[in-house]
């Protein structure tokens, strides 16, 4: 092949391409890295966690990541998406169907951390439930308070949260500091506080299955 006929360098698959690439929400990055630590040939790449608050942008961001991965690694790398629907209203599923890529089951991270049956039972018990995960407990001030403008307009709290009755912290870890933050968040929002230790829930099962390690 003459030099001018060769593929450009960025079009050649990476010889060290992962066996499985997990494209996940940045809000799950710690958990995904912990789950895949002992899984050979599995790589994690994350999308900006701030899209947790901008779900209309998630599908496009995932599509870009899929395209980048296929250019970089070629067809032998399996891609799995560690997002639930996450408020995309089906647009993420449309992108994944076109790309031939699977995702974790569920509507959102609260469902796959708690487990679908448990989450449904919690909602039946009290529909006015606001949920935190480890990530949201860490980022409560940034994503919830500042993100909703409550730092500037605290009088809007009841407009946003007046129909909620309790806050459930779905804890992935046994961290007293995060528990204290979550309890303080409940107080800040005027909600009753409950702690449920879920660990990684169905997230771990899905990732290990995708990696062929279940």
Image (cartoon, grey):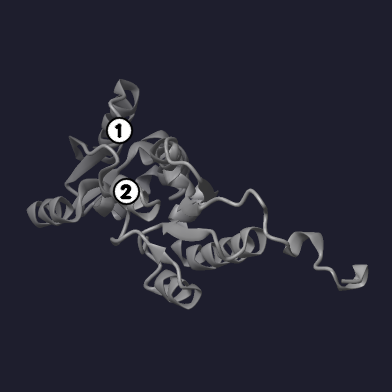
Mark 2 vs 1: CB contact within 8 A? no
Task: Find the distance from the CA under tag 2 to the CA under tag 1.
Answer: 21 Å
Q: Front-most of 174 and 100?
A: 100
User: Which residue is farthest left?
Assistant: 125
* Residue at the spot 49% in from the left edge and 60% down from the top edge: 78
Q: Is residue 75 above or below residue 163?
A: below
User: Which residue is farthest top?
Assistant: 176
User: Which residue is farthest front?
Assistant: 1
Residue 14, x across and y down, in percent: 67, 54
Residue 102, x across and y down, in percent: 40, 65
Q: Quadrant of the N terminus?
A: bottom right
Residue of label 2? 203
Q: Is residue 82 above or below residue 7?
A: above
Residue 1 marker = none
Q: Between label 2 and label 1, give the one nearer the viewer.
A: 2
Residue of label 1? 182
**Is residue 153 visible to us here?**
no
**100 sits to left or right of 160:** right
**134 sits to left or right of 45:** left
Q: Front-most of 1 and 144?
A: 1
Q: Badge 2: how crowded within 10 Å, few (<14), some, or many (20+)?
A: many
* Residue at the spot 13% in from the left edge and 55% down from the top edge: 117
Q: Front-most of 213 and 164?
A: 213
* Residue at the spot 32% in from the left edge and 48% down from the top edge: 203
């Amino acid at each position: 092949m003459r030099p001018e006929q060769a593929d450009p360098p960025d079009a050649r698959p990476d010889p060290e391409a992962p066996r499985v690439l997990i494209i996940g929400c940045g809000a799950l990055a710690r958990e995904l890295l912990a789950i895949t630590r002992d899984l050979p040939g599995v790589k994690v790449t994350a999308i900006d966690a701030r899209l947790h608050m901008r779900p209309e942008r998630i599908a496009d961001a995932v599509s870009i990541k899929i395209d980048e991965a296929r250019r970089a690694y070629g067809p032998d790398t399996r891609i799995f998406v560690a997002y639930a629907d996450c408020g995309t209203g089906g647009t993420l599923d449309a992108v994944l169907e076109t790309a031939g890529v699977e995702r974790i089951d569920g509507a959102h991270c609260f469902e796959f951390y708690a487990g679908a049956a448990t989450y449904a039972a919690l909602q039946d018990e009290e529909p006015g439930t606001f949920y935190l995960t480890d990530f949201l407990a860490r980022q409560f001030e940034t994503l919830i308070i500042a993100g909703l403008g409550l730092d500037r307009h605290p009088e809007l709290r009841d407009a946003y949260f007046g129909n909620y009755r309790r806050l459930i912290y779905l804890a992935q870890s046994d961290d007293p500091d995060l528990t204290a933050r979550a309890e303080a968040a409940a107080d800040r929002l005027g909600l009753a506080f409950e702690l449920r230790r879920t660990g990684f829930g169905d997230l771990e099962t899905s990732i290990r299955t995708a990696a062929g390690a279940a």
